[in-house]
Image (cartoon, rainbow, N blue to C red):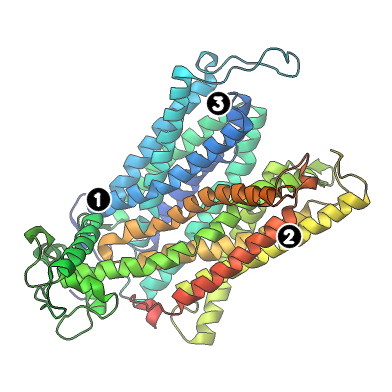
Amino acid sequence: MEGGHEDSSWEGYVDWRNRPALRGRHGGMLAASFVLVAEVLENLAYLANASNLVLYLSKYMHLSPSKSANNVTNFMGTAFLLALLGGFLSDAFFTTYHIYLISALIEFLGLIILTMQARTPSLKPPECNPSSTPSIPCQEVGGGKAAMLFIGLYLVALGVGGIKGSLPTHGAEQFDQNTPQGRKQRSTFFNYFVFCLSCGALIAVTFVVWVEDNKGWEWGFAIATIAILLSIPIFLAGSTFYRIKVPFGSPITTICKVLVAAMLNSCMSSSPSNAIANLATSPCHQTEASEEAEQNAKQSEQQPDQLPTESLKFLNRAVVNKPAHPALECSVRQVEEVKIVLKILPIFACTIILNCCLAQLSTFSVEQAATMNTKLGSLKIPPASLPVFPVVFIMILAPVYDHFIIPFARRVTKTEMGITHLQRIGIGLFLSIIAMAVAALVEIKRKRVATDSGLLDSTNPLPITFFWIALQYLFLGSADLFTLAGLLEFFFTEAPSSMRSLATSLSWVSLAMGYYLSSVIVSMVNNVTDDSGHKPWLSGHTINHYHLERFYWLMCLLSSLNFLHYLFWAMRYKYRSAGARK
C-alpha cells in the first residue's frame, strides 16, 4: 500500500460499519474535531457534579463533612481508576468507538437516577434546619435512598472511567503516525484535548455550580444529563469520518503470560544459555497486526536475527525452546511489548506527586481564600470558584503553546517535535515545585497580615486580596497542562499498538492515586507532628492557626525529590516512536 493512493485502505483499521477504512476518506483533524467537542460536553457533565458534590451530600443527604469529603474523594478516584477498565476493553474486545458510546449511556443512566432523586422529596432524607431546631438531629441518608444515591454516583463513575479510557485514544488514532504531518497534528490534538477539558470545566465550575446553588440541584443534574446526552449524537455525527482500530486481544493476558513464562522458564532452566527459539511473531499477530504495529515491532526488534533486545534481559527467558507449558509459548514481539510497558511505568509513577499537589491546593487554597478579601469591585467572588483560575490559565496557555512555543522550539532545535514528551512532562514537574514554593510564601504573607491586623481568631476577611492565591494556581495550571498533555501523548506514542488505550489510561490513574495519596500525606503529617509533642501542623480552631506554610514547604521538598527521581528515569529512556527520535 502506498500512502499516495487515496483509495487504499488503512491496514488494521475499519470504519464504523466494519469495512476497511480508506486513506483520504477516514481519519484526520476533521474526525478528531468531533472527539474534542464530545470531550467538552463529557467533562462538563462530570465536573458539574464532582466540583460541588460535597455540598450536596452534606446539605441535602445530611452526611457529615468528613463523610461527604471521603465519598467525593472515593467517587473521583474510582472514576479515574476505572479508566483502566475502559482502556483494557478498548484494546481487548471492543473498539474505542463502541466503548465511548456504551460508557456515555451508562453515565447518562446514572445522571438520570441522580436527577430523579434530587427532584423527588420522597427519595431524599427529610429536610431539617439545625440552626432553628438544634434539638432535632438531621437524618442521614440510608436504606434504599442511600442505595439509589450511590448506584447513581458509581454508574456515573463507571461511565466516566470508560470515556476517559477510550476517548483520547480514539481521537489520537485518527492521525497517521508514519508521516511528520500526522505526528504534528496528533500533538496538536492532545494540546486541544486538554483545552477542551478546561472548556467543560469552566462551564461546570461557574454556570452549573451557580445553578445548583441558586436554582436547585435537580437543575444542575439535569444540565449534566443533557450535556452527556448531547455528546452522543455529536460523537456519532463523526462516524463516517472515523478510522477505528481493530482490537488485538487482551493486553493483560500478554503481559501476564510473558511474566509467568519468564519466571517459570528461569526456574526450570539448568543453563543460562538456554536457546531462544521462538523468533517469529505469533500467527494471531501476523494476521491482525496493523502497519503501525509492524513498524513498532521492527523498531523494538532491531537486531538482524530478530533476537530479543538486551534490556530487561530476564524477560528473554519467556522465549525458549521448550516452555514450561504450551500455553506459555511467547513470541519475541510479545516479550518486547511487555518490556516497553515496564519501561514507561517509572515515568507514570513520577507524576503521582504532582497530582497529589493538585489535590492539596484544590482544598487548602479554597480555605485560604475564604479568609481573604474576595471582592472584585462590587462583585463578591465565592471561594469555591477558585478552580476557575487554573482552568482559564490552561485555556490561554494551550493555544499559545501549540501555535507559538512549539513552532519556535522546532526552529531552534531543528527537530520535528521541538519539545519532546519527556521534556514536556519534566517542565510540568518543575513548575509544580515552583507552585508549592509560591504557595508557602503566599501563606506566610497571609498569616503575617492576619497577625498584624489582629485578626488571627476573627472570621472577618483579612485586608489582603485573594488574587495572591492566583499566583500558585498560575504555576499549577501550567504544570497540569504540560504534564497531562505530555503524558497522554507519551503513553499513546510509546505503547505497543495493541496496548495504547490501556497505556493512555495510566494518565488518569495517576490522578486517582494523587487524590488518594494526598489524604494519606495529610494524615501522616498530622500524626508525626502530633507525636513529636507539638501541635499538629494541619489542625486548629481556624486555618490561621494551621502551619500550612510548613506543609507546603514539605510538598515542595517532596516535589523536588520526585523531580530528581524523574530525571534519573527520563535521561535513561530511549524513545521507540518515530517522531520523538527525530
Q: What residue type is labelled 1?
A: Trp
- Measured in 3D between alpha carbons, the distance from the residue under mark 1 to the one under mark 2, in whole angstroms, is 52 Å
Numbered disc 3: secondary structure: helix
Q: Is residue 391 above or below residue 67?
A: below
Give the residue at x 17% y 86%: 304
Q: Is residue 219 above or below residue 272?
A: above
Q: Where is residue 146 in the image (x, y as percent from the top left)?
A: 48, 23
Numbered disc 2: secondary structure: helix
Q: Residues within 10 Å of mark 2 (few under 14, many from 20)?
A: many
> What residue does disc 3 label?
218
Q: In which quarter of the image is the N terminus?
A: bottom left
Front-lying residue, 251 or 416: 251
Give the residue at x 34% y 75%: 577
- Nearer the observer: mark 3 or 2; the answer is 2
Front-lying residue, 37 or 139: 139
> What residue does disc 2 label?
440
* Quarter where residue 448 is shown: bottom right
Q: Position of residue 149 (x, y in %)?
A: 47, 26
Numbered disc 1: secondary structure: loop
Can the viewer see residue 11 in this picture?
A: no
Give the residue at x 23% y 53%: 92
- Measured in 3D between alpha carbons, the distance from the residue under mark 3 to the one under mark 2, in whole angstroms, is 39 Å
* 199 to the left or right of 386: left
> What residue does disc 1 label?
16
Q: How crowded is mark 3: few (under 14 residues within 10 Å), some or many (20 or more)?
A: some
